[in-house]
Image (cartoon, coloured by chain):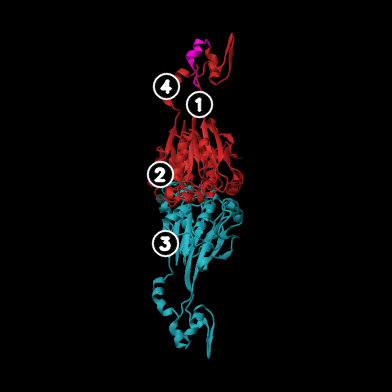
Chain colours: A red, B cyan
Amino acid sequence: MIDLLLLGTGGMQPLPDRWLSSLLLRCDGELVLFDCGEGTQIPWKRFGWGFRRLSAICLSHVHADHVAGLPGLFHTLATSGRTEPVDIHGPAGIAAVVTGLRVIAPRLPYEIRVREWAGGDRFDLPAGLVGSVIEGQHGVTSLAFRVDLARARRFDPARATARGIPRAAWTRLQRGEDAAWEGGSATPEEVLGPPRRGLAMGYLTDTVSLPTFDGHFRGVDLLVSEGTYGDPADAGKAKGHNHMTFGEAATIARDAGARRLWLTHFSARMTDPALYLPHATAVFPATEVGHSGLTTRLDFDDEGVEREDAGVMAPPP
Amino acid sequence: MIDLLLLGTGGMQPLPDRWLSSLLLRCDGELVLFDCGEGTQIPWKRFGWGFRRLSAICLSHVHADHVAGLPGLFHTLATSGRTEPVDIHGPAGIAAVVTGLRVIAPRLPYEIRVREWAGGDRFDLPAGLVGSVIEGQHGVTSLAFRVDLARARRFDPARATARGIPRAAWTRLQRGEDAAWEGGSATPEEVLGPPRRGLAMGYLTDTVSLPTFDGHFRGVDLLVSEGTYGDPADAGKAKGHNHMTFGEAATIARDAGARRLWLTHFSARMTDPALYLPHATAVFPATEVGHSGLTTRLDFDDEGVEREDAGVMAPPP
């Protein structure tokens, strides 16, 4: 499963009642942060997800409102006791930004490894997650992140028993590897079910709407997207500033076949973003206006059933 | 007069209920900021003092909790419409820090001029204020700031009239300059009263207590001082971390003959600093425990009388 926590929803400047747009993902105890503006660590502390397991930071682009919180976070992470490396994934130019900001965080008890990616790249994230990016359009290079968690095919113990496969060989077959034992052998195809749908989420910010987004976010369980402007009358201003409206974000969610949409990265001039929600739900009903503290859990489709099956599926000790 | 606003009171890390330690000073409409940790601009927005008139930033030292908010502030200042230069005053090394942090604020509509000072230096601040610094002891160089606002000597119109000085010459004499007219001349000494007490404040943070502080802060109207630890039992820890206790700060205020003391820069582990106030007031009764939003106005001693005299003192149009 994947847990998600929206830390803030503001664009450009942190406000007394609105933290800068940032998202925290948790999977198998490991944390991945998306963007880190000034103050991001403060709501993070309030919601209590802890810092030490932060393994990766994905940065959409180099603008200050998405990266200025890094040095403070680096110090807090040091205080949390982390000693394992932290990977930073971002577009070209992000390494120079991290180097510049580390003028006030030069010595840390863990290694920071910066990886610069371009559109079409795929990379490993912690806990078996896989990231992939395409490029947005924002004046500077911005990356649209997709994260996938694949799901193992179901192992059928009844078929394995009927086929006479000894229990000692089950683990290898469950992992998708061939198994052999004295007097026989088997392939995974004989005991594994069809491929199963995994989980996926998208994080899209600081870009105009591009036709490539539909394919990139195809079928995600949740798309977290900027909607800097709520009013469709601001569509021209949105394009001029390389941003999107609620309606444009909703259109991407609909055309990509996303299951749900969270809106974030609101203009400071939009005091109550919820007023503009109907402009999104008219296009894509499963839209929520984000707020600091909004959380959800993405579960595999039949996760409950799966949990009940766990005893049957487990190989003997 | 001088207005002061305490923006935050935290040390080391910003917390959900405590901004990092920072002080805003206003004199004749011009603003001077003391320290700028992550998030400093947020309470600043709440209290509504505006950004555009920020002329100078005094930085005590290069540690992240005192400077990480600079790039965000630079952007907000740009948005406010400022085009006049901004002076940054700090210890050696501060220019490199500002350069590093400007990797995410490279182009601004105003000039940033960094001035590095050492102990004993004096420098001009806006609105006729004069800054002076001595060095603290904190592992890295830290500066203890004093700000003075001198007061003009009182002009005596009765003496000037009795002496037969024409009104056209009064302005020069009031400014302390000699005046001459057809048939006569006069010196300021003839019409000005004795020197008058001005205003002064001190900003002291991230240092152990040093014997030089008493003289540096002699007679200030307000000393704003760190008190990282409230409990006198933490005196050893305070020294080990190059910080001070409430009692040490109060002792400086008392021995310097300060009029008032505000405590700030509290350890994150000190949930309710007010519990420890008696350890300060036992030494220096005029102590307050700081909080975000604490304000005061420093007035010349007889400011009210001065205002009533204003009509008499003004030269004719």
Residue found at the very far bottom of the displayed protein: B183
Q: Chain of mark 3?
A: B
What quarter of the picture does the N terminus of chain B occupy?
Answer: bottom left
Nearer to us of marks 3 and 4 is 4
Question: Looking at the rendered structure, which numbered label has been put on residue A49?
Answer: none
Q: Is residue A102 above or below residue B203?
A: above
| The one of A80 and A218 positioned closer to us in this rendering | A218
Whole-percent x, y for residue A38 in the image: 50, 48
Whole-percent x, y for residue A117 in the image: 60, 39
Whole-percent x, y for residue A250 in the image: 44, 41
Q: Is residue B189 above or below residue B3?
A: below
Question: Looking at the rendered structure, which numbered label has been put on residue A308?
Answer: 4
Considering only order in the chain, which callout, 4 or 2, is on the residue closer to the N terminus?
2
Q: Chain of mark 2?
A: A
Q: Secondary structure at mark 1?
A: loop
Task: Give the residue at x 56% y 51%.
Answer: B63
Amino acid at circle 3: Thr
Residue A159 highlighted magenta (yes or no): yes
Q: Secondary structure at mark 4?
A: helix
| The one of A40 and B142 positioned closer to us in this rendering | A40
